[in-house]
Amino acid sequence: MSSIPQKDLTKFLPMTREEMEARGWDYVDVVFVTGDAYVDHPSFAMALLGRLMEAEGYRVAILSQPDWHSCEPWRRFGRPRLCFAVSAGNMDSMVNHYTANRKVRNDDAYSPGGRIGLRPDRATLAYCQRAREAYKGVPVIAGGVEASLRRIAHYDYWSDKVRRSILLDSKADLLVYGMGERPLLEILRRLSAGEPIKNIRDVRGTAYRLGASEKPPEDAICLPSYEEVVASKEAFARMTKMAHLETNPYNARRLVQYHDREAVVINPPAFPLTEEEMDRVYGLPFQRRPHPLYGDEPIPAFEVVKHSIQIMRGCFGGCTFCSITAHEGRIIQSRSPQSIIQEIEQLKQDPEFKGVISDIGGPTANMYRMNCSRPDVREKCRRLSCIHPTICKLLNTSHGPLIELLKRVRHVQGVKKVYVASGIRMDLAQLSPAYMNHLVCYHVGGHLKVAPEHCDPDVLRLMKKPSIEDFERFAKKFHELSRAAGKEQYLVPYFISGHPGCDLKAMIRLAEFLKRTGYRPQQVQDFMPTPFDIATCMYYTGIDPMTGEKVYVPRGERERRLQRALLQFWKPENYFLVREALRLAGRTDLIGSAPHCLIPSNPPKEALVARRRSQQAESLAEDRNEAKATGAGYRPHRKTFRRRTTKKS
């Protein structure tokens, strides 16, 4: 990039042998293997952990998006003195590669130019295998979101089966789950002191493999075995409940899960970082840029966050479909205002910064410095959400510290605008009229993203989300405050289709809600079952693991398409799918010209054109598949093609 001198590569952690030698190193302590492009920004795990290891005196090299077809890239820096640290990247590699329909994505936001194909499926497995091949005897430590959420037996949506713990399949020596700073530094300290990796088994936030002849720790709770959860969905649901109830670091117990004669032992979670520790981590010397080797090729994920500031981590919402709480924890870890201001001062040095902070927040922007007011109770609590079904009376919900922070940030010289773009909890925001007014007057860039997710009370209960009435109250107040401030501002609500518990009737109720309120979502969030989540357990088992009740699950591709279409019922290309859904649900009263109807009786011209194009595309796809199967280059004559598609119509 033009703003970073190409020759000054020593400001970054080395990505090549030449950069390593330019630092005067003849070896490295840790090779950090990642499936993402190397961006030296605190929003990227390889930078955050790499800089922290560097600050502790370790020599760290970044092996970014290596060619996994051989182990040669793993030998780039020579034999690492301590270990390989392996991560698939900021996302699970399967989520990164495939849509909720299991279709290959067209881009990869964490790769240069958004190019696909720069990391393998199940990247953690491939990367750990190559590390083993490259240097026998070098410890391999797996971490990141992919490893974290697959640490026990888990349902894998893409293969539609229950898979073993990723620790066993990767053959890593240790697995670090959660955000990783505390456990990773402790492991490195002990390795550096000469302790064998096989002896490092008591670190919080880690999991290790137990051999067939070894006995598990006496204090460990035994989860249903891999064989049990494969054979029984009830056992899978029981395993999910047990695992989630042991996620509070202040009272979590050690877990063990057998896989045949082997076992995986999961130590209690690492303790959250203190404010001082958060300040130190985010105050490290990040260049806030992609590595210069990428030239002018943009990294899409970086473009989104390059002028943003993360003020906290963690989320106590506990939404069943979300992995944030499972990975970052439900205890909020906040930075001091001084640390945040210092980062803004650094951000101002960027020639591309024009005075606009694109986002100031975190997983949930308005949970800053919110925590339990009774630490003695927190140490015993096993609630998975502090705000569902009701907001806990012991939760400190004051927005005062956040309001004061926003005021300070807004008055930093050179800062023109500060936006909140990472989403807020509407139920919490409404507890503070001052925050609502402050947000609307100063921190909305025309549109505010919010996530009511659904309107059906049973679906919302399974999601652990507040009622739709809560959203409507928030929307009313938001628009009142916007008008009073003389601003034209809009809410952008997100809704999910295909979530466990949502049948066609529930989805039609959501379509009616959208019709009544005038919201027209331009993007559809189709539920994707990701490993470890409670909603994923519901999807696989048809059971709510926390209550044992049976849950309806929309599984087939046809019903999922119908539900997606209902979220955008007004689009002509969705007309026939919406009509089919209404007929299947016995709601033909919503077909017609009355004000409450979703679609007209007769298909509009655009709907017929869209259907014809879809049929033509399907026919071409059939021909291509047939040609591939026979090895021929057959293409139908235009008359044959026209006759075939006319017959289908």
Image (cartoon, rainbow, N blue to C red):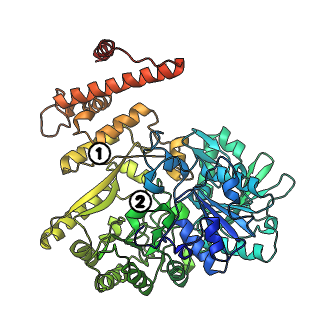
In terms of secondary structure, where does tag 1 sit? helix
Mark carried by residue 32: none
Identified at 28% across, 31% down, the residue is 582
- Does residue 552 show up? yes
Find disc 2 in the rendering and name its residue: 298
The type of residue carrying mark 1 is Leu
Which mark is in front, 2 or 1? 2
Find disc 1 in the rendering and name its residue: 510
- Does residue 382 show up? no
The type of residue carrying mark 2 is Pro
Q: Do the residues labelled 2 and 1 touch (CB within 8 Å)?
A: no
Q: Closer to the camera, 401 or 50?
A: 50
Residue 122: % across, % down: 60, 48
**Residue 244 shown left or right of residue 107 in the figure:** right
* Quarter of the image that includes the N terminus: bottom left
Q: In which quarter of the image is residue 598?
A: top left
Q: Closer to the camera, 332 or 74?
A: 74
Residue 439: % across, % down: 27, 73
Residue 514: % across, % down: 24, 47
